[in-house]
Image (cartoon, rainbow, N blue to C red):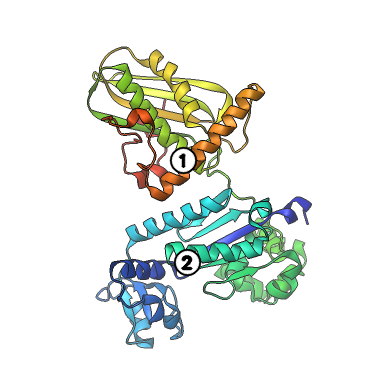
Amino acid sequence: MDTNMSKKIIYHIDVNSAFLSWQACHNLSIDSNAPDLRTIPAAVGGSQEERHGIVLAKSMPAKAFHIRTGEPLVQALKKCPDLVIVPPNFPLYVEKSKAFIELLKEHAPVVEQYSIDEAFCDMTGMENLNGDPVQFAHTLREKIKNELGFTVNIGVSNNMMLAKMASDFTKPDKVHTLFPDEIEKKLWPLPIEELFYVGKSTSKKLRFLGIKTIGELAHSDLSIIKNHFKKHGEVIWNYANGIDNNLLKEQPDANKGYGNSITTHYDITDRTTALKIILSLCETVGARIRADGVYIGVVSVSLVDCEFHHVSKQTTLDSSTNVTEKIYETAIPLFDQAWNQKPLRLFGVSTSHASRERYEQFSLFDSEKNEKLSKLNTAIDSIRNRYGEDSVKRACFVNSETKHMTGGLQKAKRNQRNCSHHTQE
Ligand SMILES: [Mg+2]
């Protein structure tokens, strides 16, 4: 096993019956006397009138009636005539999912959202801060339950695949480990269908080859498996042996840029107001950069004047940064170069060359200052995440008509938004 790999600590965190739990939390937040959907036979599914509705999520008591996710509601009702069915509520799921990921980001240096209710966290090196990683997984599980009201399973291991397999062991509200030395006992006896990445057709073929358990796959001849399944065969053979060389996607896209733009409702004719708008855009862009744990190397400013002339200027930084002030400092001269003194209607700030690796070309003094600012910015982000983005404002925005954080979209959407195409050159 790769020595580097065995040093990693990866969590896979999976919300238990996410859609149903989230609906239950929501109902309880409106009426604390509402029945807790998690404690009665209940399912999330298409409306009962819709004959083709299927079960999207179910409570543990519903599971006791052998109700399965994906089965038609009609069939589920036959198994349990008293089943309470609630319709899906996707906006609610998005909101809960976001709160879930935000909480993880408060505790993990690298978070990769895997689906609406699942995420991987790279906790490598956090022992100094958190103590034993397994113990801390319990702390995190409790914290999610107390602060967000729903339960999760956490799988702990040295790679993503093993952590994901571990989180799928008994549910709900549990922490499981699946470290390499536990593979033989915990992973190998499982039926082949339970291995990550083994779908129906693959499992059927494997069974045809006489391979029924994960252990049997692990001990099979790799060349035979590769013959039958090509590249996919190698992947699942490695998985069966606990090998997963995938690293957490520290950034969704290596060339990802972060940008925001805003169209004003009136002409902006003075530099002071214009720069305030630029700063407010730098605030939201900076927050997103830090939320993703990256540093950017290029800043650009785009302007559209009242005659719809579009000008964009960009510059490469000597040292990459995640600091709002630095982005703003860079944006000011770009703004001055771009502005032709005509009244302005659209402002955009975008950044690119994002990377988790930081490059620096400045003096030690600058470096220290940058580090301090970076920490201060991150602290402000966490306060804003917790208490709302208006909880901390720069002095220049107090009593100002200019909003201190802008992006032309509501906050929730802004967080996912990349630079809008009309500001990208
Ligand atoms: Mg789940």
Q: Is residue 156 left or right of residue 303?
A: right
Coordinates of residue 341 in the picture (x, y in percent): 30, 12
Q: Which residue is drawn at 27% across and 76% down?
A: 48
Q: Report the mark closest to the observer, 2 or 1.
A: 1
**Is residue 316 placed above or below 149 in the rendered structure?**
above
Q: Quadrant of residue 242 in the image?
A: bottom right
Q: Which of 330 and 54 is in front in this view?
A: 330
Q: Mark yes or no: residue 243 visible.
A: yes
Left or right of 183? Residue 118 is left
Identify which amino acid the numbered label 1 is placed on: Ile
Q: In this view, does 335 lie above or below 38?
A: above
* Quadrant of the frame with the C terminus: top left
List x then y, in percent, for residue 405: 36, 36
The residue that disc 1 covers is 380
Report the front residue among 397 and 286.
Answer: 397
Residue highlighted by disc 2 = 145
